[in-house]
Image (cartoon, rainbow, N blue to C red):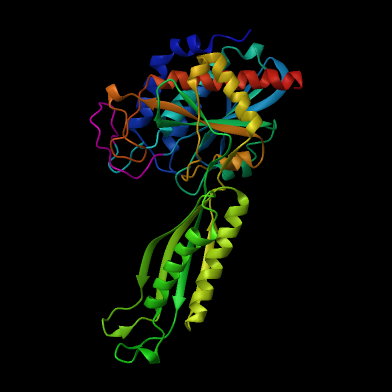
Protein backbone atom coordinates (compact mmCIF):
# COMPACT_ATOMS: atom_id res chain seq x y z
CA UNK A 1 0.00 0.00 0.00
CA UNK A 2 1.44 3.43 -0.91
CA UNK A 3 2.21 5.97 1.82
CA UNK A 4 -0.22 8.72 2.72
CA UNK A 5 1.49 11.41 0.65
CA UNK A 6 -1.07 14.07 1.52
CA UNK A 7 -0.41 13.58 5.22
CA UNK A 8 3.34 13.61 4.62
CA UNK A 9 3.08 16.83 2.62
CA UNK A 10 0.76 18.44 5.15
CA UNK A 11 3.31 17.81 7.88
CA UNK A 12 5.87 19.98 6.04
CA UNK A 13 3.43 22.53 4.61
CA UNK A 14 4.90 25.45 6.54
CA UNK A 15 8.40 24.48 5.44
CA UNK A 16 7.38 24.34 1.78
CA UNK A 17 5.69 27.73 2.00
CA UNK A 18 8.74 29.19 3.74
CA UNK A 19 10.96 27.89 0.95
CA UNK A 20 8.70 29.43 -1.66
CA UNK A 21 8.60 32.82 0.06
CA UNK A 22 12.37 32.94 0.40
CA UNK A 23 12.82 32.18 -3.30
CA UNK A 24 10.09 34.67 -4.17
CA UNK A 25 11.81 37.48 -2.29
CA UNK A 26 15.08 36.94 -4.11
CA UNK A 27 14.16 36.16 -7.72
CA UNK A 28 16.80 35.60 -10.37
CA UNK A 29 16.58 35.80 -14.13
CA UNK A 30 17.44 32.96 -16.48
CA UNK A 31 21.12 31.92 -16.47
CA UNK A 32 21.54 33.96 -13.29
CA UNK A 33 19.95 31.56 -10.77
CA UNK A 34 23.16 31.29 -8.73
CA UNK A 35 21.71 31.87 -5.26
CA UNK A 36 18.58 29.84 -5.98
CA UNK A 37 20.74 26.93 -7.13
CA UNK A 38 22.80 27.11 -3.93
CA UNK A 39 19.65 27.00 -1.82
CA UNK A 40 18.37 23.99 -3.75
CA UNK A 41 21.70 22.18 -3.44
CA UNK A 42 21.93 22.81 0.30
CA UNK A 43 18.40 21.60 0.93
CA UNK A 44 18.83 18.41 -1.10
CA UNK A 45 22.15 17.57 0.50
CA UNK A 46 20.62 17.88 3.95
CA UNK A 47 18.19 15.19 2.83
CA UNK A 48 21.06 12.93 1.80
CA UNK A 49 20.35 13.43 -1.89
CA UNK A 50 23.42 13.72 -4.09
CA UNK A 51 23.53 16.74 -6.37
CA UNK A 52 25.40 17.98 -9.38
CA UNK A 53 25.25 21.04 -11.57
CA UNK A 54 23.95 21.04 -15.13
CA UNK A 55 23.60 23.97 -17.53
CA UNK A 56 25.66 26.11 -15.11
CA UNK A 57 22.85 27.21 -12.80
CA UNK A 58 20.74 24.05 -12.97
CA UNK A 59 20.73 21.40 -10.25
CA UNK A 60 20.08 17.67 -10.57
CA UNK A 61 19.41 15.68 -7.44
CA UNK A 62 19.53 11.90 -7.42
CA UNK A 63 17.61 9.91 -4.82
CA UNK A 64 18.60 6.24 -5.00
CA UNK A 65 16.00 3.82 -3.76
CA UNK A 66 16.53 0.80 -1.58
CA UNK A 67 15.97 -1.66 -4.41
CA UNK A 68 16.93 -1.83 -8.06
CA UNK A 69 14.51 -0.41 -10.59
CA UNK A 70 13.94 2.31 -13.12
CA UNK A 71 14.59 6.02 -12.87
CA UNK A 72 11.87 8.63 -13.06
CA UNK A 73 12.48 12.35 -13.56
CA UNK A 74 10.62 15.23 -11.92
CA UNK A 75 11.23 18.78 -13.11
CA UNK A 76 10.79 22.28 -11.71
CA UNK A 77 11.95 25.52 -13.31
CA UNK A 78 13.63 28.21 -11.21
CA UNK A 79 13.95 31.47 -13.18
CA UNK A 80 11.98 34.67 -12.72
CA UNK A 81 10.85 37.44 -15.09
CA UNK A 82 12.12 40.96 -15.72
CA UNK A 83 9.05 42.60 -14.17
CA UNK A 84 8.41 44.91 -11.24
CA UNK A 85 6.21 43.34 -8.58
CA UNK A 86 3.20 45.39 -7.49
CA UNK A 87 1.64 43.04 -4.97
CA UNK A 88 1.58 44.05 -1.31
CA UNK A 89 2.47 40.68 0.22
CA UNK A 90 5.14 40.86 2.94
CA UNK A 91 7.39 38.50 0.97
CA UNK A 92 7.32 40.56 -2.24
CA UNK A 93 10.42 40.71 -4.40
CA UNK A 94 13.31 42.63 -2.89
CA UNK A 95 14.99 42.96 -6.28
CA UNK A 96 13.72 45.89 -8.36
CA UNK A 97 12.57 44.89 -11.81
CA UNK A 98 12.68 41.14 -11.17
CA UNK A 99 9.69 39.06 -10.06
CA UNK A 100 8.44 35.50 -9.89
CA UNK A 101 5.35 36.27 -11.96
CA UNK A 102 4.94 32.79 -13.44
CA UNK A 103 5.08 30.54 -10.38
CA UNK A 104 8.52 29.04 -10.84
CA UNK A 105 9.20 29.73 -7.17
CA UNK A 106 6.18 27.53 -6.43
CA UNK A 107 7.43 24.78 -8.71
CA UNK A 108 10.84 24.77 -7.03
CA UNK A 109 9.50 24.79 -3.48
CA UNK A 110 6.92 22.09 -4.19
CA UNK A 111 9.52 19.81 -5.76
CA UNK A 112 11.83 20.33 -2.79
CA UNK A 113 8.91 19.21 -0.64
CA UNK A 114 8.55 16.13 -2.81
CA UNK A 115 12.25 15.41 -2.39
CA UNK A 116 11.86 15.51 1.39
CA UNK A 117 8.83 13.23 1.34
CA UNK A 118 10.47 10.63 -0.88
CA UNK A 119 13.83 10.82 0.89
CA UNK A 120 12.11 9.56 4.03
CA UNK A 121 10.81 6.60 2.05
CA UNK A 122 13.90 5.80 -0.01
CA UNK A 123 14.39 2.35 1.50
CA UNK A 124 11.02 1.35 0.04
CA UNK A 125 11.64 2.84 -3.40
CA UNK A 126 12.25 0.30 -6.19
CA UNK A 127 14.42 2.55 -8.31
CA UNK A 128 15.60 6.15 -8.44
CA UNK A 129 14.12 9.61 -8.62
CA UNK A 130 15.97 12.39 -10.42
CA UNK A 131 14.99 15.92 -9.48
CA UNK A 132 15.62 18.45 -12.26
CA UNK A 133 15.77 22.06 -11.04
CA UNK A 134 15.99 23.78 -14.39
CA UNK A 135 17.26 27.26 -15.23
CA UNK A 136 16.17 29.65 -17.93
CA UNK A 137 12.75 28.35 -18.95
CA UNK A 138 11.64 31.90 -19.75
CA UNK A 139 14.65 32.67 -21.93
CA UNK A 140 16.59 30.48 -24.32
CA UNK A 141 15.48 27.33 -22.53
CA UNK A 142 17.47 25.34 -20.01
CA UNK A 143 16.00 21.90 -20.68
CA UNK A 144 18.15 21.16 -23.72
CA UNK A 145 21.28 22.35 -21.96
CA UNK A 146 20.57 20.06 -19.00
CA UNK A 147 20.15 17.16 -21.42
CA UNK A 148 23.34 18.13 -23.25
CA UNK A 149 25.14 17.99 -19.90
CA UNK A 150 24.09 14.36 -19.52
CA UNK A 151 21.16 14.99 -17.21
CA UNK A 152 19.07 12.15 -18.63
CA UNK A 153 21.87 9.59 -18.22
CA UNK A 154 23.71 7.78 -15.42
CA UNK A 155 21.22 6.49 -14.46
CA UNK A 156 19.07 6.77 -17.56
CA UNK A 157 15.70 8.44 -17.07
CA UNK A 158 12.82 6.47 -18.58
CA UNK A 159 9.93 8.89 -17.92
CA UNK A 160 9.54 12.59 -17.07
CA UNK A 161 6.83 14.43 -15.20
CA UNK A 162 6.42 18.11 -14.47
CA UNK A 163 3.82 20.69 -13.57
CA UNK A 164 2.89 24.34 -13.82
CA UNK A 165 0.67 26.28 -11.46
CA UNK A 166 -2.54 27.54 -13.04
CA UNK A 167 -4.86 30.35 -12.00
CA UNK A 168 -7.37 28.83 -14.38
CA UNK A 169 -8.02 26.00 -11.92
CA UNK A 170 -9.18 26.15 -8.30
CA UNK A 171 -6.82 25.04 -5.58
CA UNK A 172 -6.92 21.28 -5.21
CA UNK A 173 -7.60 20.57 -8.89
CA UNK A 174 -5.06 18.98 -11.23
CA UNK A 175 -5.43 19.57 -14.96
CA UNK A 176 -4.47 16.94 -17.52
CA UNK A 177 -4.13 17.42 -21.26
CA UNK A 178 -3.77 14.43 -23.58
CA UNK A 179 -1.47 14.81 -26.58
CA UNK A 180 -0.64 18.30 -27.85
CA UNK A 181 -0.58 20.58 -24.81
CA UNK A 182 1.65 23.60 -25.51
CA UNK A 183 2.72 25.24 -28.73
CA UNK A 184 6.13 25.32 -30.32
CA UNK A 185 7.57 28.82 -30.57
CA UNK A 186 9.96 29.88 -33.32
CA UNK A 187 11.34 33.35 -33.92
CA UNK A 188 11.92 34.89 -37.32
CA UNK A 189 13.62 37.95 -38.82
CA UNK A 190 12.67 39.26 -42.26
CA UNK A 191 14.71 41.91 -44.04
CA UNK A 192 13.24 43.40 -47.22
CA UNK A 193 15.87 45.09 -49.40
CA UNK A 194 15.13 47.47 -52.27
CA UNK A 195 16.43 50.69 -53.76
CA UNK A 196 16.02 54.20 -52.44
CA UNK A 197 14.86 57.14 -54.53
CA UNK A 198 13.25 60.54 -54.25
CA UNK A 199 9.69 60.38 -52.93
CA UNK A 200 8.56 62.39 -55.97
CA UNK A 201 9.92 59.69 -58.29
CA UNK A 202 8.94 56.37 -56.67
CA UNK A 203 9.28 54.53 -59.99
CA UNK A 204 13.03 54.98 -59.76
CA UNK A 205 13.23 53.10 -56.50
CA UNK A 206 11.82 50.03 -54.81
CA UNK A 207 9.55 50.98 -51.89
CA UNK A 208 10.39 48.49 -49.14
CA UNK A 209 7.82 49.92 -46.74
CA UNK A 210 4.97 49.21 -49.16
CA UNK A 211 6.43 45.79 -49.95
CA UNK A 212 6.94 45.01 -46.27
CA UNK A 213 3.32 45.90 -45.57
CA UNK A 214 2.27 43.45 -48.28
CA UNK A 215 4.44 40.77 -46.66
CA UNK A 216 2.67 41.31 -43.33
CA UNK A 217 -0.75 41.09 -44.96
CA UNK A 218 0.17 37.96 -46.88
CA UNK A 219 1.48 36.25 -43.73
CA UNK A 220 -1.81 36.91 -41.95
CA UNK A 221 -3.74 35.53 -44.91
CA UNK A 222 -1.68 32.34 -44.75
CA UNK A 223 -3.10 31.56 -41.33
CA UNK A 224 -6.66 32.52 -42.23
CA UNK A 225 -6.77 30.90 -45.68
CA UNK A 226 -4.19 28.10 -45.85
CA UNK A 227 -4.35 26.60 -42.37
CA UNK A 228 -7.15 24.29 -41.27
CA UNK A 229 -9.31 26.34 -38.84
CA UNK A 230 -9.25 23.34 -36.51
CA UNK A 231 -5.43 23.27 -36.50
CA UNK A 232 -4.10 26.22 -34.44
CA UNK A 233 -1.26 28.32 -35.84
CA UNK A 234 -0.26 31.87 -35.00
CA UNK A 235 2.09 34.12 -36.98
CA UNK A 236 2.74 37.41 -35.21
CA UNK A 237 4.77 40.39 -36.42
CA UNK A 238 6.10 42.09 -33.31
CA UNK A 239 8.35 44.78 -34.81
CA UNK A 240 8.44 46.62 -38.14
CA UNK A 241 11.21 49.13 -38.71
CA UNK A 242 12.28 51.09 -41.77
CA UNK A 243 15.82 52.15 -42.48
CA UNK A 244 14.45 55.40 -43.88
CA UNK A 245 15.15 58.62 -42.03
CA UNK A 246 13.60 61.28 -44.29
CA UNK A 247 9.97 61.83 -45.19
CA UNK A 248 10.80 62.50 -48.85
CA UNK A 249 13.04 59.48 -49.49
CA UNK A 250 11.91 55.98 -50.46
CA UNK A 251 13.40 53.63 -47.88
CA UNK A 252 15.66 50.92 -49.27
CA UNK A 253 15.30 48.52 -46.33
CA UNK A 254 12.69 47.29 -43.88
CA UNK A 255 13.21 44.84 -41.04
CA UNK A 256 10.49 42.98 -39.20
CA UNK A 257 10.59 40.37 -36.46
CA UNK A 258 7.99 37.98 -35.18
CA UNK A 259 7.09 34.58 -33.80
CA UNK A 260 5.44 31.42 -35.07
CA UNK A 261 3.39 29.32 -32.68
CA UNK A 262 2.18 25.91 -33.78
CA UNK A 263 1.06 22.59 -32.37
CA UNK A 264 2.86 19.47 -33.51
CA UNK A 265 6.00 19.00 -35.63
CA UNK A 266 4.23 18.83 -39.01
CA UNK A 267 2.41 22.15 -38.61
CA UNK A 268 5.62 23.65 -37.26
CA UNK A 269 7.52 22.63 -40.40
CA UNK A 270 4.79 23.73 -42.80
CA UNK A 271 4.35 27.14 -41.20
CA UNK A 272 8.07 27.89 -41.14
CA UNK A 273 8.28 26.99 -44.84
CA UNK A 274 5.26 29.20 -45.57
CA UNK A 275 6.71 32.22 -43.78
CA UNK A 276 9.93 31.91 -45.74
CA UNK A 277 8.20 31.30 -49.07
CA UNK A 278 5.65 34.10 -48.68
CA UNK A 279 8.19 36.72 -47.67
CA UNK A 280 10.60 35.83 -50.44
CA UNK A 281 7.85 35.46 -53.03
CA UNK A 282 6.04 38.73 -52.29
CA UNK A 283 9.30 40.68 -52.27
CA UNK A 284 10.48 39.15 -55.53
CA UNK A 285 7.14 39.79 -57.27
CA UNK A 286 7.42 43.48 -56.37
CA UNK A 287 11.04 43.89 -57.41
CA UNK A 288 12.73 43.52 -54.03
CA UNK A 289 14.60 40.84 -52.12
CA UNK A 290 13.70 39.29 -48.77
CA UNK A 291 16.15 37.62 -46.43
CA UNK A 292 14.45 35.33 -43.91
CA UNK A 293 16.08 33.84 -40.80
CA UNK A 294 14.04 31.43 -38.67
CA UNK A 295 15.39 30.40 -35.29
CA UNK A 296 13.79 27.32 -33.76
CA UNK A 297 12.96 27.67 -30.08
CA UNK A 298 10.86 25.37 -27.89
CA UNK A 299 9.39 22.33 -29.66
CA UNK A 300 6.07 22.42 -27.83
CA UNK A 301 4.71 19.95 -25.30
CA UNK A 302 3.14 16.75 -26.55
CA UNK A 303 2.03 14.65 -23.60
CA UNK A 304 2.20 10.89 -23.92
CA UNK A 305 -1.42 9.64 -23.66
CA UNK A 306 -0.49 6.54 -21.66
CA UNK A 307 1.64 8.51 -19.20
CA UNK A 308 -1.10 11.14 -18.90
CA UNK A 309 -3.62 8.44 -18.06
CA UNK A 310 -1.15 6.96 -15.61
CA UNK A 311 -0.61 10.28 -13.83
CA UNK A 312 -4.35 10.87 -13.75
CA UNK A 313 -4.92 7.55 -11.99
CA UNK A 314 -2.26 8.42 -9.43
CA UNK A 315 -3.91 11.79 -8.77
CA UNK A 316 -7.37 10.24 -8.46
CA UNK A 317 -6.08 7.73 -5.92
CA UNK A 318 -4.48 10.56 -3.97
CA UNK A 319 -7.07 13.35 -4.19
CA UNK A 320 -10.24 11.69 -5.45
CA UNK A 321 -11.98 11.41 -8.81
CA UNK A 322 -13.24 15.00 -8.78
CA UNK A 323 -9.75 16.44 -8.42
CA UNK A 324 -8.78 15.62 -12.01
CA UNK A 325 -9.84 18.07 -14.71
CA UNK A 326 -9.34 17.22 -18.38
CA UNK A 327 -8.09 20.30 -20.24
CA UNK A 328 -10.11 20.44 -23.49
CA UNK A 329 -7.87 22.73 -25.53
CA UNK A 330 -4.12 23.13 -25.87
CA UNK A 331 -2.34 26.34 -24.95
CA UNK A 332 -0.59 28.45 -27.56
CA UNK A 333 1.83 29.45 -24.82
CA UNK A 334 5.22 27.78 -24.80
CA UNK A 335 6.99 25.57 -22.28
CA UNK A 336 10.37 23.94 -22.78
CA UNK A 337 9.42 20.85 -20.77
CA UNK A 338 8.57 19.52 -24.23
CA UNK A 339 12.30 19.08 -24.86
CA UNK A 340 12.39 16.33 -22.24
CA UNK A 341 9.38 14.66 -23.85
CA UNK A 342 11.24 14.42 -27.14
CA UNK A 343 13.54 11.96 -25.37
CA UNK A 344 11.25 9.98 -23.04
CA UNK A 345 7.51 9.60 -22.50
CA UNK A 346 5.86 11.63 -19.79
CA UNK A 347 3.30 14.32 -19.13
CA UNK A 348 3.02 17.90 -17.93
CA UNK A 349 0.08 18.66 -15.66
CA UNK A 350 -1.43 21.83 -14.21
CA UNK A 351 -1.86 22.52 -10.50
CA UNK A 352 -4.73 24.80 -9.55
CA UNK A 353 -3.77 27.83 -7.41
CA UNK A 354 -6.87 30.01 -7.80
CA UNK A 355 -8.75 31.09 -4.69
CA UNK A 356 -10.95 34.13 -5.28
CA UNK A 357 -11.31 34.81 -1.56
CA UNK A 358 -7.54 35.13 -1.30
CA UNK A 359 -7.26 37.29 -4.41
CA UNK A 360 -5.19 34.82 -6.39
CA UNK A 361 -6.85 35.31 -9.76
CA UNK A 362 -4.29 37.52 -11.51
CA UNK A 363 -2.89 35.73 -14.57
CA UNK A 364 0.67 34.57 -15.03
CA UNK A 365 3.10 37.27 -16.20
CA UNK A 366 1.08 39.91 -14.33
CA UNK A 367 2.76 42.32 -11.89
CA UNK A 368 0.25 41.31 -9.21
CA UNK A 369 0.44 37.57 -9.79
CA UNK A 370 -0.23 35.59 -6.61
CA UNK A 371 -1.00 31.99 -5.75
CA UNK A 372 -2.93 30.18 -3.06
CA UNK A 373 -0.07 28.64 -1.09
CA UNK A 374 -2.37 25.87 0.14
CA UNK A 375 -1.79 24.36 -3.30
CA UNK A 376 1.94 23.85 -2.73
CA UNK A 377 1.83 20.78 -0.44
CA UNK A 378 -0.82 19.31 -2.74
CA UNK A 379 1.58 19.60 -5.67
CA UNK A 380 4.37 18.08 -3.56
CA UNK A 381 2.13 15.13 -2.77
CA UNK A 382 1.06 14.74 -6.40
CA UNK A 383 4.67 14.62 -7.61
CA UNK A 384 5.50 12.06 -4.93
CA UNK A 385 2.52 9.87 -5.78
CA UNK A 386 3.22 9.96 -9.51
CA UNK A 387 6.91 9.09 -9.04
CA UNK A 388 6.13 6.36 -6.52
CA UNK A 389 3.48 4.75 -8.68
CA UNK A 390 5.68 4.94 -11.76
CA UNK A 391 8.58 3.14 -10.09
CA UNK A 392 6.31 0.34 -8.88
CA UNK A 393 4.64 0.26 -12.29
CA UNK A 394 8.05 0.06 -13.95
CA UNK A 395 9.18 -2.72 -11.64
CA UNK A 396 6.09 -4.78 -12.43
CA UNK A 397 6.91 -4.64 -16.15
CA UNK A 398 3.44 -3.41 -17.08
On-image quarter of the N terminus: top right
**Residue sticking out furthest to the left:** 88
Is residue 92 in the magenta section? Answer: yes
Q: Residue at x 74, y 19 (%)?
A: 395
Q: How many marks?
A: 0
Q: Is residue 354 above or below residue 58?
A: above
Q: Is residue 69 left or right of residue 122?
A: right
Tell me where residue 394 appears, x and y as whole percent.
71, 22
Q: Residue at x 70, y 32 (%)?
A: 156
Tell me where residue 74 appears, x and y as whole percent.
57, 29
**Residue sticking out furthest to the right:** 397
Is any part of residue 113 visible from this angle?
Answer: no
Tell me where residue 10 appears, x and y as whole percent.
44, 12
Q: In which quarter of the view is residue 370 placed?
A: top left
On-image quarter of the C terminus: top right
Residues in magenta, as a range: 80-94
Q: Residue at x 66, y 17 (%)?
A: 65
Nearer to us in this view, 88 or 374: 374
Q: What secondary structure is the magenta-colored segment mainly? A: loop
Tell me where residue 168 appears, x and y as whole percent.
40, 32
Is any part of residue 359 visible from this angle?
Answer: yes
Q: Is residue 395 left or right of residue 39?
A: right
Q: In which quarter of the view is residue 310 placed?
A: top right
Nearer to us in this view, 241 or 54: 241
Is residue 126 in the magenta section? Answer: no
Q: Is residue 18 above or below residue 27?
A: above
Q: In which quarter of the view is residue 32 placed?
A: top left
Amino acid sequence: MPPDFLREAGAIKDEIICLRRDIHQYPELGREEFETAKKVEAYLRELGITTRRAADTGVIGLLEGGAAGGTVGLRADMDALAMQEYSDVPYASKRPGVMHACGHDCHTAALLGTAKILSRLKDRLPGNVKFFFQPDEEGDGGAQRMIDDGGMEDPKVSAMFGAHVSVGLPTGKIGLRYGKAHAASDEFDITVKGRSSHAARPHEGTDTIAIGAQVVTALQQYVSRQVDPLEPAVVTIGTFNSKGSQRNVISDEVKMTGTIRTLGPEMRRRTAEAVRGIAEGVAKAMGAEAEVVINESYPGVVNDPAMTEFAGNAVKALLGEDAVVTIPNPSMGTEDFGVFLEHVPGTFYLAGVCNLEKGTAFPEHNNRFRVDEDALPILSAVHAAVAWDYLFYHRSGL
